[in-house]
Image: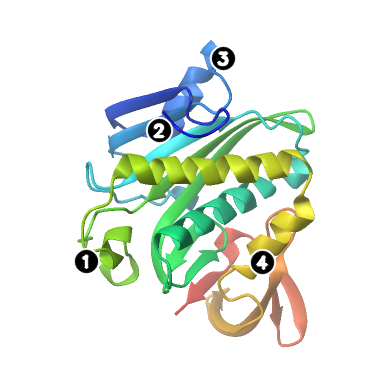
Amino acid sequence: MFDTLFTGKNFVELAETASTNSDVMRMLAGNPPEGTVVSATHQSQGRGQAGNYWESRSGKNLTFSILYYPTFLPVSDLFYLSKMVSVALQRCISTLLPGQIVRIKWPNDLLVNGQKIAGILIENQLEGQRVRVSVLGIGLNVNQRDFSPLIAAKTCSLRHFQDTDLDLRAVMAALLQQVEREYLRLKSGQFAAIDRDYLSKLYGYQEPLHFRIDGQTRSGIIIGVEKQGKLAVELAGTLRHFDIREIEFIR
């Protein structure tokens, strides 16, 4: 079905579901194989980071979740899962949209020319100081051309840059290949290489940006993303670290 070693070999395709991440979590009692993928034509309650809703029109986009068992990964390195999926998405989208500027926006979005095209929601189960289960939820806008007025100005899809609709299964195949490649790099301990690839495509990295912090607009420069996933920003000569709820990008 897919040209991968194990990712997507067990593929569950649903016409409709509330959340593919929740579906995978419920499947865990049956010990599904690593690389299991659950995909939905329509996801009625797709979730984004911090409880946000993920808008996706039925049959137009990819909404799916991948199950991995990264027991090799210490809890202290948990954010590397987000990094490796982000790198995989960035590479896949860049291949599909040559000439466009594709960036990773901390902590879990992908942008094309500054507009959001994909999002990631990762849910984990821990065992001691190791990661026992990781469910990687991915939403990628593929063929949807119109979005609700609330997000239309800052959202795009692959179709916006193509003359015709794309084959969803072909896009899925390309994406699963990239995710598995990055997962295997992570498993082999190539943390430094993943860091380099992540930072090289990170939106706003080492560039002056405006942020909203504690209700105020501040100017700062993104210095990097620390091991635990906090965003490192230099503000008026002082280095500070932020969780997702503590800082907001201002365009």
Q: Earlier in the sequence, mark 4 or mark 1?
A: 1
Mark 4 crowdedness (10 Å alpha carbons): few <14, some 14-19, many ≥20: some
Q: Earlier in the sequence, mark 1 or mark 3?
A: 3
In whole angstroms, how far apart are the C-alphas of marks 1 and 3? 42 Å
Q: Earlier in the sequence, mark 2 or mark 1?
A: 2
In whole angstroms, how far apart are the C-alphas of marks 3 and 4? 35 Å
Q: Is residue 51 left or right of residue 194?
A: left
Q: Is residue 19 left or right of residue 216?
A: left
The amino acid type found where label 4 is placed reads Leu
| Label annotation for residue 20 | 2
In whole angstroms, how far apart are the C-alphas of marks 3 and 2? 16 Å
In whole angstroms, how far apart are the C-alphas of marks 2 and 4? 29 Å
The amino acid type found where label 2 is placed reads Thr
Q: Secondary structure at mark 3?
A: loop
Horizontal and vertical percent for residue 221? 65, 81
Q: Earlier in the sequence, mark 2 or mark 4?
A: 2
Q: Residue 246's image quarter?
A: bottom right
Mark 3 crowdedness (10 Å alpha carbons): few <14, some 14-19, many ≥20: few
Q: Quadrant of the C terminus?
A: bottom left
Circle 1 is placed at which residue position? 149
Q: Quadrant of the N terminus?
A: top left
Horizontal and vertical percent for residue 63? 36, 41
**Is residue 151 visible to the viewer in this orientation of the structure?**
no
| Label annotation for residue 199 | 4
| Residue in view at x 24 percent, y 47 percent | 60
